[in-house]
Every structure is written in structure tokens, then in C-alpha cells.
Image: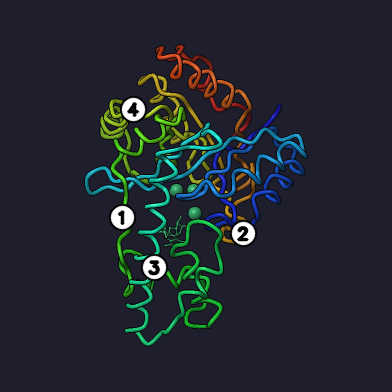
Amino acid sequence: MALIDLHTHSTASDGTFAPGDLVALAAQKNLAAVALTDHDTLEGLAEARTAGERYGVDVVSGVELSVADGDRSVHLVGLFLPDAPGPLAEALAYLRSRRHDRNRRILDKLRECGIPIEYDTVTALARGAVGRPHIAQVLVSMGAVTSFKEAFTRYLGTYGRAYVPKDKLTFGRAVELIHGEGGLTVLAHPYILGLAGPALAETAGRYRDLGLDAIEAFYPEHSQAQTLEYLALARKLGLGVSGGSDFHGDAKPEIELGRGRGNLRVDISVLDLLRARQAKRQAGLAPDEEKGLDQPPGAM
Ligand code: AMP
Ligand code: ZN
Ligand code: FE
Ligand code: FE
């Protein structure tokens, strides 16, 4: 059984493996395919693709965006992006520049808390999208906090002393940008919605009507019951299914590439179905009815 991983982060955003090293690791773990889905940047994709050719791993070009649905913040993964995307790349560049403004405001607040940090120290830690994880890393290394978790609880998290909200695209605009490049949109880690049953179905149905293509049913934090609910819901709504570990290397050491917390299994058939769905979308046709994903492929 060939396994894949359609949600990973490299040093282009807040992961700790360079894109090429991440693909080499995928090959070492016998993964047939891996999607690089860095936050707000396509910076790592060329390197990942080159490594994919070298190691015989099918590399899918992706990105992860934080998007606003009213007051709710959800994450969208875009998959199957082209090498030289136009309007999407411009939007990402804008989001990264807004990140710099936000990061500087966070540092201003930290300074008011008696913690002075030079912004260069933070930007030195990332190639593409710079954010709170990098500031957390600095806070840990300077001894202002003892852990990443403490950095978020005390300072950087929603209820922290140095919290500054992030600018986000709306759900609809993000979908439009990804579709504009011929990509597919995936609702990442749906468990963060905190919804189940009819409320989940209503929200996911609304997302489908906004152009959502697939749900990330296979994810390390999902219980088997959640995975089954997401699979059934995707089928009911005519949505596709995706899955991935959200690998971040040493920034999330408990998550293994391709295997999550040890029991994640995303079969290559998941990718084949998504590709078929993308081909239909590009041809302007409705997706085929998908059968056979009601049960998670392999043991859970
Ligand atoms: P940013 O995009 O700059 O807002 O940073 C978001 C990233 O910070 C997420 O993708 C997580 O990796 C990390 N993060 C957010 N909240 C926490 C938390 N409470 N503890 C640890 N990491 C977190
Ligand atoms: Zn991340
Ligand atoms: Fe996410
Ligand atoms: Fe992620």
C-alpha cells in the first residue's frame, strides 16, 4: 500500500526541514507523494520539486492560508498549484508584507513587557512567511520563556500580552485565488471548527457553496469517529477527501511525516481522486461521484 502526505511545512514557513530535505525524508519513509503546503508562500516549491525528481517522490505544489469566515478563522490548503502563479502569488506577497507589520507590532508589545527583540533576529529564522512561531523561537532561545507553549500562553496566543490579530483573506476570496490558478481547495484540519452533526454539515455545506473542493478527513488530531464523520459528510456533500500530517519537523516533534502520531495512513488513492477532481474542475465539469472512501484506507 502506497502512502502519501498532503499537508507539510518546510523552512519556507515555520517548519524546520528545508524543502529538499523534507522530500528526502519522504523518500526515506517510502511515501509515494508529498504536498508542500507552507503558510502564505510558494517559496519552497521549486526546491521540493527538484528533490522530488531526484528521489522519485511525487511532489504536489500547495499552500496553506488562514481565511476568515465571519469571526471564525479557518485554514484552507490549496493543492495542484502551477509553477508560476499570478494573482495568487501577488496576494501571498501582500499577506507576507502584512505579516511583517504584524510581527513588528508584536515586538513593540513585547518591548512594553520588558522584552526587547530586534526584528532581524526573527526574520533570520525563515525564508518565506515569518510569524509567531519564529518569535516564539527567539523568546525560548533568549530565555524569556522556557517553552514554545509558554511563549504562546503568556505572550503570542489570542489571550497573550503581545497578541496582535493577523490579516486574512475571506474564505471566498481565497477560494477564488486558488481556483484562478487551477488548484483545488481543501478545508484543513476540520476538527478546529469544533463542530459535529448538523452544525458541521451546515457549515461545510456553506463552504462547498463558496467553492470548497475537499475536506482533510485524515489528520493526526482526528479521532476515528471524527474521521468517519468527515468522510461521510464529504460523500454526502459531493466533496473530495484529503489527508496529511501537518508535519513541521522539530517545531512539532510529536508529528512524524506521513504517519502523524503514528496511526495516520493516507493512501495514494486519495491523491488519484483529488487529481481526477481537479481535471474535472479544469474542464468545467461536475466531479465524479466518489465511492469507497467511507472507510479509512488501512488501519486507523
Ligand atoms: P502565525 O501564522 O504567525 O499566526 O502563526 C501561527 C502558527 O503558530 C500556527 O501554525 C502554529 O504552528 C503556531 N501556534 C499557534 N498557536 C500556538 C500555540 N498555542 N502553541 C504552539 N504553537 C502555536
Ligand atoms: Zn505552521
Ligand atoms: Fe493549519
Ligand atoms: Fe499546516
176 left or right of 145? left
Does the closest atom of ligand 1 sit within 8 Å of the Cβ of label 3? yes
**Front in this rendered view, residue 158 or 65:** 65
Mark nearer the N terminus (3 vs 1): 3
> Which residue lies at the image location 43% right of the left edge and 36% below the top edge?
226
Crowd tier of the residue under label 4, counting other residues whose Cα lies within 10 Å: few below 14, some 14–19, many 20 or above: some
Question: Residue beneath label 4, please?
Answer: 211
Badge 1 crowding class, 10 Å Cα cut-off, few under 14, some 14 to 19, many 20 or more, is some
Among numbered discs 1 and 2, the one appearing first in the sequence:
2
Circle 4: residue type:
Gly
Q: Position of residue 197 (x, y in %)?
A: 31, 32
Which sits earlier in the primary sequence, circle 4 or circle 2? 2
Question: Split into 4 quadrants, where in the image is the C terminus?
Answer: top right
Residue appearing at x 48%, y 79% in the figure: 145
Per the model, the C-alpha gap separating discs 1 and 2 is 24 Å
> Which residue is found at the position 50% from the left and 18% from the top?
279
- Taking the image as four quarters, which one is ligand 1 found in? bottom left
Q: Is residue 47 above or below residue 199?
A: below
Residue tagged by mark 2?
Answer: 16
**Image-based side of 96 in relation to 298, left or right:** left
Some atom of ligand 3 lies within 8 Å of the CB belonging to the residue at label 4? no
Per the rendering, the mark at residue 103 is: 3
Q: List x then y, in percent, for residue 53.
A: 73, 36
Task: Judge depth for marks 1 and 2 and give the one in front.
Answer: 1
- For the residue carrying disc 3, how many other residues have a C-alpha within 10 Å: few (<14), some (14-19), or many (20+)? many
Foreground mark, 2 or 3, reads 3
Q: Is mark 1 on a helix, strand or loop?
A: loop
The tag earlier along the polypeptide, 3 or 4, is 3
Camera-side residue of 73 and 84? 84
Q: What element carries label 2?
A: loop
